[in-house]
Amino acid sequence: MNKRIWIINQFANTNEMPGHTRQFELSKFLSKKGFLVSVFSSDFNLSLRNYFKKGKFLFYKKETLNNVRWIWLSVMRYERNNWKRYINIISFDINLSVHLFIKILFSLLFKRKPSLILASSPQLPASFCALLISKIFRIPFIFEVRDLWPTVLVDLGNINKKNLVIKFLFSIEKLLFLFSDAIVVLSKGSIDYVNSKGGRNIYYLPNGSNLDFFKFVSLPKENTNFSSERPFKIIYSGAHGIANGLDNVIKATKYLSHLPIKIFFVGDGPEKEKLILLAKDNKSIVFKKPIPKSKMPKYLSKADAILVSLANVELFKYGVSPNKLFDAYSIGRPVITTIPGLINFEVEKYNLGVTSIANNPKKLADAILALYKTPRYIREEMGKAARKHAEDFYSKDLIFKKYYKLINKVIDKD
């Protein structure tokens, strides 16, 4: 009998949606290995702040993609990170809990209980609901730590650590660490954090890139001198929130305005309107709407460099695994990063681009200028080194093979 696995992440996306696609690609991989996979997510897309499938269903909608069953659960809408976001999270948790409980009871009647439940952060309450279900019905459970949430909220300075909601989230985070059968972290630096909170059986399986999808592409054709018709093109693709530190990027361009350098902000988020106002009359910045993952390789291939920007947060020095970084590696582009710690260390060690620090526009401008002045053949060498680094360390095929072994190990142990 085929093993059944349930994957839970409120923010999981398919390839036709903007945002991360880890669960989409992992579920497809596991399906090819013989698992019967169901993914529980919400069609309210985090990047668009809107219902991707128009939200026409009342409680849930089922869809089969790549032999994987997707269950899209209804949630309440929100546009900004205010109290409505909490309602959005709670509505998903309630819908998920009811759906899982009914589905479990039904599966027991036909002896089709899942072999494993895998829940992924940052939505901790949903993961905790899944953990409770797993314990009640004695189902092995893996907790995947995508982001150290709520630590990032505290480090950003948004919420006091003594806030009751934060205390509650830290409590359920600790319970998830203590009672999971295995814990997967996406950043190597998160291992010590999880261990300090009582977590055991910790496995480092980072984000990565689909090397067949993000193929290596040579740098765009250019003359020795860039011009307004063919500027030096830098692309940032991702969320536009406080955590991304994009105001720092806009401020950096005032030191570069005399040069044919353009930075494209691709995506959406709660800070986008403020960023557009901040960049008013700034000819170095171009804003673009979110792009589905399926169109991202072609779009990134037009870039001379990829920007990976985050704010000045202590957690980001050790606890992040940015998808956009590995996509840039795979396609063969030099990167510009503002993430001191593990990310900048890697870029510098393997000569994959240039680095700066967060919240320092002048230093970021200097880093961009240094890359701009770097001869094309050296930037091509950086891109080739980045591709090799992706092949050696961040191939999703290699990562998912390790994931597959871990899943079987947890199931067989039970």
Image (cartoon, rainbow, N blue to C red):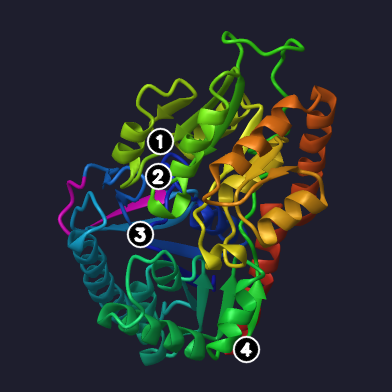
Please say if 165 is above or below 304.
below
The one nearer the camera, 226 or 302, is: 226
Mark 3 highlights which residue?
41
Q: Earlier in the sequence, mark 1 or mark 3?
A: 3
Residue type indicated by callout 3: Ser
The answer to whether residue 228 shows anywhere in this view is: yes
Residue 160 forms part of the magenta stretch: no
Q: Secondary structure at mark 4?
A: helix
Residue type indicated by callout 2: His
Q: CA distance from mark 2 to mark 1?
A: 10 Å
Q: Residues within 10 Å of mark 2 (few under 14, many from 20)?
A: many
Please say if 394 is above or below 265.
below
Q: Earlier in the sequence, mark 2 or mark 4?
A: 2
Residue type indicated by callout 1: Pro
Please say if 101 is above or below 302.
below
Q: CA distance from mark 1 to mark 3?
A: 20 Å
Residue 240: image tag? 2
Residue type indicated by callout 4: Lys
